[in-house]
Every structure is written in C-alpha cells, then in structure tokens.
Amino acid sequence: MPVLTRDLIQSAGDDFISQQLPEFHGACYPMETSGSTGKPVRIIATDFTRLFYDALMLREHDWHRRDFTKKLLSIRWARRGFAEPPLGHQQSTWGPPINQYHATGSSIFINVASETHKQIDALLLHSPHYLLSYPSQLAALAEYCLDNNICMPFLEEIRTTGESLRDDYAQSIRLAWPQTRLTDVYSSVEIGNIAQQCPEHNHYHVNQENVLLEIVDEHNQPCETGKPGRVLVTSLMNYATPLIRYELGDYAEWGNPCQCGRNLPVIKKIHGRKRNRLVLPNGESLFPYLGEREDRNKITTAVRKFQFIQHTPHDIEYKIIVSQPLSPEQENQLRQLHQKNLGYPFNITITYVDHLPLNHAGKYEEFVSLVNMNHSRT
Ligand SMILES: [Zn+2]
C-alpha cells in the first residue's frame, strides 16, 4: 500500500469519505485537524471511533492512577476572549468522558493564547493538583517560575500533550517543579490517543487495539529499534475515513519490549514534526539543537523568548524578544553560539520583535523550517 499523505486526503475531498458504514458505527461527526502543519485535514469520526477514543483516554488515566476527585487545570487552545486567565472557564467536573463514568472534582480551562504571567496567576489562584498543557507552553511557565522564584507545591502531576515533549522542555519542567510527576501522551486529532507513557518507564506503549503504527525510513522501509523514522498510522476503528499508512508528519523510534508486563509495542522516543526540523545545505534534515539556556545567559540574559525561522538552506532568522537592547558584540556572540549549536555556519539574521505568534493550534514553535522538504516524501 502506498503512503497516504495529507495532500492526498485534501485533494480527494468527499471521495475519501465512506458512503456505506456498518450500522453499528452510529452517527458521524466531522472533525478538523488544527492545520498547524498547513491546511487542515477533515476527518469523519463515528460513535464507534469515539467509543475507542474514550476507552483509550480512560486507560491512560487508569495506568497513571489519577484521583478524579482532585482539581484539574488545563491550558489549551480556545477562541480569543474565552477562558482568559486568571479566572478562566470553571467547570464542576473534569468533563467527558471521565464524568460519564466517575464522580470528579472541578476543572479550570485557561486560554493558551494569554500572557505567561497571567497563566501563573491562574495557577496560583486555583492551586490545581493536575496541570495539562502543551510542552512548549509548560516550558515557558517553568522558566518564568525559575526566573521569579515561584513555587507550586500543590502540583502533583503535569501532563503534556499536543506536541512532542523535547528533552530541553522536560528539563525545564523538572527543574521548576522537582516534586511533580511529568507524563506525556502522544495523540492526534485523526487517531486520538496513539501511545502513552508507561507508568513505570519514560517510554511509550502504542494503543495497538486502535492503531497500527509503523516507523519507516526514507525508502518507506521499516526502521529497526533505535533508528528514528517517519510515523505512519492505520486507524483500525474508523471506517468512515479510512486512514491507511497515513503519514502524521512526526518522527519516532522503536524501543525494546517493556518489562512492566504490558505487551503493547514500545516507542522509545517521539522526535516531533517535520516542519520543526533543520534542513542542512546538503538536503539532510535533523532535529535542531537549540542550545542551553545557561550558555545563552553567559552572553546575555536579555533574551526573553526566541524563534528560529529557516528561510533557505543557508539562511536563518533569529527572532527575539528582549528586555533591553543587545550590543553588536553580544549579537555576534549569539550568532556564533547558534552556528555552533546548529552545526553549520548559517547566515543568521537577528530580528527584534514585540511578540512571537502561536501557530494555528495555539502552540509556540521555537524552530520552524520553511524550506521545502519534499525529498523525504514519496
Ligand atoms: Zn511498560
């Protein structure tokens, strides 16, 4: 079977939607991917697929033994003006599917597209036991807490979702909240929960009952354990939108079988999205090393937030928000540091900005490549 791409689904339009579903699959619900990697993809879910989405979500809670009577705060995407911090949108339960099966405590929803210090105010105001958000956003909150000596002893667990949990993000989160458990879920709009962290290890177990997951190389051949490759998914429960060998755009690598007793396949690491990969002038792509905060701080502590945009295989724009202007010497030192980190003497242009945009999914991306990477597609 050929690899199914986003472009193919988009160009097929309604031809891609099944017209004759088994009756027991129930009603249909159109859903759209966020379009964070381009044009959104339209997927039809059914009552049957939703049952599996919910079951896998509940299994994830069960593995990690969450106490539903405690308070949950989630910081996620919402339309402008809704769920603004510090109050946010307050609900008496955790919402579906959990409240359909369990009595739950209250939950608070906070709009991710709000200022970091206001989100901190929300956390201090509501003192939740559980916090759920995107890794990049949690890393930004963690850095704010570290910079301002803010402690949150009430936080028992932080759950990350929606984008890959990079090592540097995890490091910041663990540094800011050392007493708090950190758990990641690998999910997508198209499939729901794809894999979740083993409660006993850092790696992930694939929800094989719902999805057939492959990791393939540039020739669409299976990758061996430990070799990163592109993730292809086949949805086993969605007959309305047949996703077969669908390329999600993520990279991941297989791990060895787990000792925990769960026989579901193990993903050792999820590397993230293609558009967040650095393209080298020779056409190779890799996950960019963006350096350590401490190294940057040795040159200047004025950089509050940054984003790299790769415009061509040789040219990278370094957008920064600063608390005070940099000297030409500091600019030069920063350029050299990033050339070293990125492993190539790119032309790095520094641009001063007042704010950095979130993508369509409400996520903040530290590195975006605009260089066409179609060479890795089939
Ligand atoms: Zn395990």
Image (cartoon, rainbow, N blue to C red):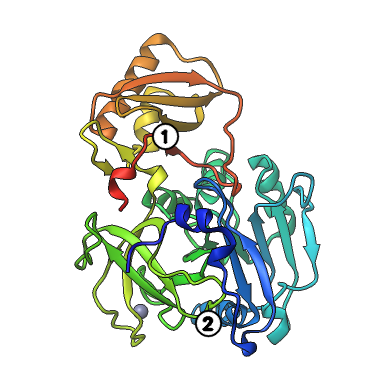
Q: Which residue is mark 2?
A: 59
User: Is 125 in front, or is 106?
Assistant: 106
Q: Is residue 4 above or below residue 53?
A: above
Name the side, left or right, on which 165 lies relative to 111.
left
Asked whether mark 2 lies closer than 8 Å to ligand 1, one says no
Residue 255 position, x and y percent, is 26, 70
Q: Is residue 236 left or right of residue 77?
A: left
Give the residue at x 45% y 48%.
172
Q: Residue at x 62, y 85 (%)?
A: 25
The quadrant of the image that shows the N terminus is: bottom left
* Residue 288 in the image, given as x and y percentages of width and height: 32, 40
Mark 1 lies on residue: 370
Q: Nearer the viewer, residue 211 or 45?
A: 45
Residue that appears at 33% across and 44% down: 374
**Quadrant assignment, res 247:** bottom left
Ligand 1 closer than 8 Å to the CB at disc 1? no
Relative to 90, 98 lies left or right: left
